[in-house]
């Protein structure tokens, strides 16, 4: 009698000799998941989850599904349940409900997304696995494979994790267990996808010595000509020395223009080399400076190592397709490169997602150095979520964190603080050295509210003194209106907002740098939103900043006399804009209010002094301490609560179960993910007709190979503008956009101004019909 063979996957071509045996798949995924999970100290938990993840494929119905699929018959993905059987087995064998909630949720949801452990007052895992024999064929499954589970070892790993976080002073055990669930889930998903695609996963440590040498060679080519250059060199050398510190969470606090990008990278390279770590993840706040940072890093590490750096910042995400594991999707979903360059949005929306496509890369944030540039730009609502995410990655994931900024926010002084290392500042700058960076002085002229005409006259005065001037407004509406008002000023002009696609913004920045360079200097006026003020390497003679938070004002000041081109400190004017509408920008509105208080209390003081900045953060964080857990849309709870004690879910469970307390892990993974968005409201990327975008769109339409389509989507990122749903609806009503193969929207050429304004709500030619 022939032994029945069970398979995990079929192939579209060939006979069953090419099919992967289920026993082999489960064994290899278990081994790979165990290896991944060991970074978090939960190798056995990972092994069990990996071993059981496809247990339901031990059925005649699933094997029949594979055969029908191979013959070309129409089948529906997921029509045969094969994940719930493993979850049911774990639930039956593991007595501890917290452990079975963790392992069961991971197994049951490994193809979709983690679910809420409590739903409608019931334990979700039990509801999902309580299906009839006709659906699960459970007896058939466990008759073929019912492996032993060492609950004692699993429990020991989770208890050790809990003891570690308690010892380190982390006070929300359920919140930390939500992270360990996501870590195991990430390991299972990645191991499953990689094994199914036949991808060899390497755990080799990169050749950091070579990268260190490339950076050192690059830095040696620079001569310290002036005092600022000399201090930048000292900062860089201190960062190099600090790279040999123990692992932990550190800060790099240097003035704007202090060379944070390469200095932080110097620290990171020394640190990963000293501690045998896997990768460096460089996180920036805005897309507007990602291209600049990427260009610099590619220049440093030369073209011969194209595989060294991965940029992942897309607002057009490739569609999920388990059967097409191309290189770009593999890299972006795994973050499997030595250096990752990404945004805060991508970082946080990975961690606080519940979906397999996003969480797959979560485990690769372990054993790494994570650099957060311009950390002061972190939204208030995300502070506690961010703090505990990096605490988890440091304490449980063995990663080191570096927080970089000119104005270090008090993240260690909030209710859920960052666990800073001992002596966390990796650079010490004396008062005398700091004085070298005194290139500007803040002029508070907010006593009188100014309209566009009055601000225009202030600009005109600066331009007539042949001072290239940057004006930063809080809203796109005010930026555009002031830009129109300033047309009467005789000089070169530029407008910078997020209505310009990245390629367009880069072109504007090239124009600015050319006009601002000493050898080709020409007076120019730039009116921008705040996108220019964090990390963009430009230097104007004068800056005018609409009143906002002190952190924003100081960042804006960093765009003035940046390299001390003028030995006399230049002016940064702070103005209060008449009719400014900040109802949709509550954080700017709150920060502006605090700045008014600080300006009033510190009249006559140096508004760039550390005392002023510290007072601002003291008031700002105190005023908004109740918003740091991220309120849900209905205001009934917070994202932090949903992923911690889940008061609403626990209450519903007690109501439904005669006041009985839920004794599992209460976290609401799905609901929290649906509530969370870094920017708020969610944005959609629209491809605009700029540069060679239309040629790429034609190539996309004519291409039939998924790999080529993904490659083109990656190239189209630099030609996208992100819009909120209300603006998207208006563009749809105007018939200004059309969908391209359900992959992205394409904007009509009449709705994009390639010269100045970028995205338009009304057609360029609409005046013809007025």
Image (spheres, rainbow, N blue to C red):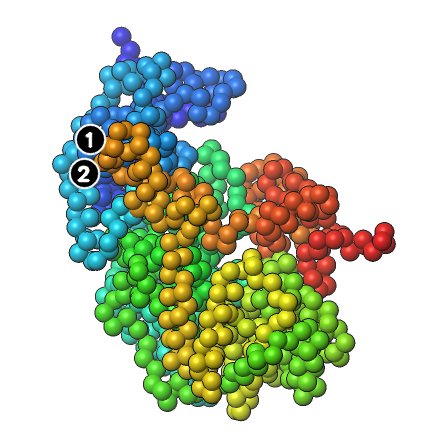
Instruction: Say above or below: 591 vs 82.
Output: below
User: Which quadrant would the N terminus be assigned to in this image?
Assistant: top left
Q: Position of residue 459 (x, y in %)?
A: 67, 80
The image position of residue 324, as x and y in percent, is: 48, 36
Q: Residue at x 39, y 49 (%)?
A: 638
Circle 1 packing at 10 Å, graded few (<14), some (14-19), many (20+), is many
Q: Which residue lies furthest to the bottom in this view?
A: 568
Which residue lies at the image location 41% right of the left edge and 79% below the top edge?
A: 612
Q: Where is residue 586 in the image (x, y as percent from the top left)?
A: 51, 60
In the image, residue 214 lies at what x, y percent? 40, 68
Q: Which residue is at the front of the view, 88 or 313?
A: 88
Q: In which quarter of the image is residue 154?
A: top left
Residue that label 2 marks? 154
Between 337 and 509, the one nearer to me in the picture: 509
Q: Which residue is drawn at 36% across and 13% down?
A: 134
| C-beta proximity under 8 Å, tags 1 and 2 | yes
Q: In this view, does 735 lie above or below 494?
A: above
What residue would you read off at disc 1?
94
- Farthest residue in the top direction? 1
Q: Can you tell which mark lies on residue 690?
A: none
Is residue 613 visible in the rendered image? The answer is: yes
Closer to the camera in the image, 347 or 363? 347
């Amino acid at each position: 009698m022939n032994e029945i063979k069970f398979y995990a996957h079929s192939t579209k071509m060939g006979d069953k000799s090419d099919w992967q045996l289920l026993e082999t798949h489960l064994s290899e995924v278990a081994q790979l998941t165990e290896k991944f999970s060991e970074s978090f100290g939960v190798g056995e938990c990972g092994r069990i989850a990996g071993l059981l993840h496809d247990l339901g494929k031990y059925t005649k119905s699933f094997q029949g599904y594979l055969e029908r699929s191979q013959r070309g018959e129409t089948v529906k993905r997921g029509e045969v349940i094969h994940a719930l059987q493993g979850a049911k087995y774990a639930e039956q064998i593991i007595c501890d409900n917290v452990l079975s909630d963790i392992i069961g949720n991971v197994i049951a949801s490994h193809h979709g997304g983690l679910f809420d452990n409590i739903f409608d007052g019931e334990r979700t895992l039990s509801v999902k696995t309580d299906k009839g024999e006709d659906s699960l064929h459970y007896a058939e499954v466990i008759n073929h494979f019912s492996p032993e589970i060492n609950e004692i070892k699993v429990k020991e790993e989770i208890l050790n994790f809990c003891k570690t976080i308690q010892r380190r002073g982390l006070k929300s055990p359920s919140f930390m267990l939500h992270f360990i669930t996501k870590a195991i889930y990430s390991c299972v998903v990645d191991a499953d996808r990689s094994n199914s695609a036949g991808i060899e996963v390497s755990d080799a440590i990169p050749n950091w010595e070579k990268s260190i040498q490339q950076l050192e060679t690059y830095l040696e080519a620079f001569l310290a000509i002036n005092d600022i250059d000399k201090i930048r060199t000292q900062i860089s050398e201190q960062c190099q020395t600090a790279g040999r510190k123990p692992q932990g969470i550190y800060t790099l606090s240097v003035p704007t223009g202090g060379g944070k990008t390469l200095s932080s990278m110097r620290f990171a390279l020394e640190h990963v080399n000293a501690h045998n770590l896997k990768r460096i993840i460089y996180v920036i706040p805005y897309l507007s400076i990602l291209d600049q940072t990427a260009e610099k890093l590619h220049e440093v590490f030369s073209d011969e190592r194209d595989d060294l750096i991965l940029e992942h910042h897309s607002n057009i995400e490739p569609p999920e397709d388990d059967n097409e594991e191309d290189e770009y999707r593999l890299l972006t979903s795994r973050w499997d490169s030595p250096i990752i360059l990404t945004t805060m949005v991508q970082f946080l929306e990975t961690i606080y997602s519940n979906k397999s496509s996003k969480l797959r890369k979560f485990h690769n944030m372990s054993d790494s150095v994570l650099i957060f540039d311009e950390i002061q730009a972190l939204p208030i609502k995300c502070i506690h979520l961010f703090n505990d995410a990096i605490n988890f990655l440091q304490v449980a994931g063995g990663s080191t964190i570096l927080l970089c900024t000119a104005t270090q926010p008090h993240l260690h002084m909030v209710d859920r603080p960052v666990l800073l290392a001992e002596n966390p500042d990796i650079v010490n700058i004396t008062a005398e050295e700091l004085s070298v960076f005194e290139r500007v002085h803040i002029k508070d002229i907010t006593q009188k509210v100014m309209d566009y005409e009055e601000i225009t006259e202030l600009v005109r005065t600066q331009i007539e003194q042949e001072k290239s001037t940057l004006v930063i407004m809080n809203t796109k509406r005010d930026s555009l209106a002031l830009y129109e008002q300033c047309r009467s000023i005789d000089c070169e002009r530029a407008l910078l907002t997020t209505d310009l696609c990245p390629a367009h913004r880069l072109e504007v920045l090239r124009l600015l740098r050319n006009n601002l360079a000493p050898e080709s200097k020409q007076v120019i006026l730039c009116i921008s939103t705040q996108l220019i003020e964090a990390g963009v390497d430009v230097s104007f003679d004068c800056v005018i900043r609409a009143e906002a938070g002190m952190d924003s004002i100081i960042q804006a000041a960093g765009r003035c006399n940046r390299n001390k081109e003028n030995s006399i400190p230049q002016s940064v004017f702070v103005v209060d804009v008449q009719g400014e509408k900040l109802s949709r920008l509550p954080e700017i509105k709150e920060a502006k209010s605090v700045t008014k208080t600080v300006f009033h209390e510190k009249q006559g003081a140096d508004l760039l002094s550390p005392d002023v900045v510290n007072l601002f953060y003291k008031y700002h964080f105190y005023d908004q301490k109740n918003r740091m857990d991220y309120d849900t849309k209905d205001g009934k709870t917070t994202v932090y609560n949903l992923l911690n004690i889940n008061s609403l879910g626990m209450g519903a469970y007690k109501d439904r179960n005669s006041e009985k307390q839920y004794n599992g892990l209460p976290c609401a993974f799905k609901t929290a993910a649906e509530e969370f968005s870094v920017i708020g409201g969610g944005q959609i990327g629209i491809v605009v007709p700029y540069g060679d975008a239309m040629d790429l769109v034609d190539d996309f339409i004519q291409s039939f190979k998924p790999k080529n389509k993904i490659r083109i989507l990656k190239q189209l990122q630099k030609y996208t503008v992100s819009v909120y749903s209300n603006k998207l609806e208006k563009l749809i009503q105007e018939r200004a956009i059309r969908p391209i193969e359900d992959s992205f929207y394409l904007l009509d050429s009449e709705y994009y101004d390639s010269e100045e304004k970028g995205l338009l709500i009304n057609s360029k030619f609409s005046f013809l019909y007025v």
